[in-house]
Image (cartoon, grey):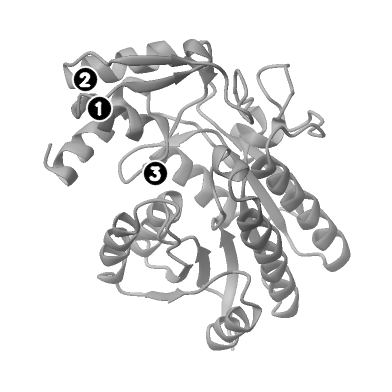
Amino acid sequence: MSRKNVILVTGAAGFIGFHLTKRLLEMGEEVVGVDNLNPYYDVSLKKTRLKILEYADGFTFYREDLENLDALKGIFRTHPISKVCNLAAQAGVRHSLKDPFSYERSNLKGFLNLMELSREYGVENFLYASSSSVYGKNTKVPFSTEDRVDTPVSLYGATKRANELIAHAYSHLYEIPCTGLRYFTVYGPWGRPDMALFLFTEAILDDRPIKVYNHGRMKRDFTYIDDIVEGTLSALQGSFRYEIFNLGNSQSIELLEFIRFIEEELGKEAKKEMLPMQPGDVVETSADIERSRKLLGFNPKTGIRDGIKRFIAWYREYYGK
């Protein structure tokens, strides 16, 4: 049986997974989506994303946990999966302080299950989401994939680095092409409610104060979802024995300036609650994307102000505000 055009996307009801799956289906690809719809954030948002995907031809969905090896085996036996794009994970740096074992189950055991099945079923490309969080205490900016990443400052970051090491071992032992993508602060329509842009927009419109950590003295490399999807597609269509790429906008912005852009787009000033640095956070993220430009043709096109405008337009329409 040919395994040519069936792509497994885990985390298909998630923010990046939804956008990637939608794009793949529009390209005429056959996609098998897996997601456990966990309640880390509003499940109704995930279900609405799924409804959009389920209208498309070529999409099959399974509500399963990655740690359920028997269920995953059934999916691999049923579908001739040629490529795996593992975007499922327990997300969130701060949440890892509250519920560490959920990260062990999804990000470690679940990842290992997928690697084992990819070996067993001869998957031709294994792509997975890593994170800028792996850079941890690194102070040299921009962050390069050539940098050492031995000092994570959150369990989330540590699990993502563990994924990179597990993938390296499987690539070396079994010649599975493995590509890790270190995403940098992804935002845009259908975004996660626990991320800054969503939280700030919601609070400002509801006349609630926003929490500004480290008194706003932080910088982030915000990357628009359409650019992330383009970079991910390029990696999925390629075939690298073992590679790791940064996918970021490569232009960091100060948090207070980011807030100002949101205020201007909403036409409303934020009430700011200035707070100290949170455990697990870092002061700055910034992506060196030269290798991504060279090998993936990755070239982010959406500026921060335009991206914020598009998100707020979606938010107002979706929530009727």
Residue type, mark 1 in image: Lys
The percent position of residue 29, horizontal first and vertical second, equals 42, 68
Which of marks 3 and 2 precedes in the sequence? 3
Where disc 3 sits, the SS reads: loop
* Callout in the foreground (2, 3): 3
Q: CA distance from mark 2 to mark 3?
A: 19 Å
The answer to whether mark 1 and mark 2 are in CB contact below 8 A is yes
Percent coordinates x, y for residue 184 in the rendering: 55, 33
Residue at 23 percent of width and 32 percent of height: 312
Mark sitting on residue 265:
2
Which is more N-terminal, label 1 or label 3? 3
Q: Position of residue 160 (x, y in %)?
A: 68, 47
Label 2 Cα crowd, 10 Å radius (few <14 / some 14-19 / many 20+): some
| Residue 312 as seen in the image, left or right of residue 186 | left
Residue furthest front in the image: 98
Q: Which residue is mark 1?
A: 309
| Res 152 → quadrant | top right
Amino acid type at circle 3 is Arg
Of 40 and 57, the residue lying toward us = 40
For image coordinates 70% across by 59% down, the residue present is: 108
In contact (CB < 8 Å): disc 3 and disc 1: no
Question: Is residue 205 depicted above or below 44 in this figure?
Answer: above
Q: How far apart in space, not on screen, are marks 3 and 1 (Cα)?
A: 16 Å
Whether tag 2 and tag 3 are in contact, CB under 8 A, the answer is no
Residue 239 to residue 4: above or below? above
Question: Which residue does the image show at 53% across and 15% down from the upper left?
Answer: 214
Of the image marks 1 and 2, the number of the one nearer the N terminus: 2
Q: Is residue 283 above or below residue 203?
A: above
Q: Quadrant of residue 225?
A: top left
The residue where tag 3 is placed is 192
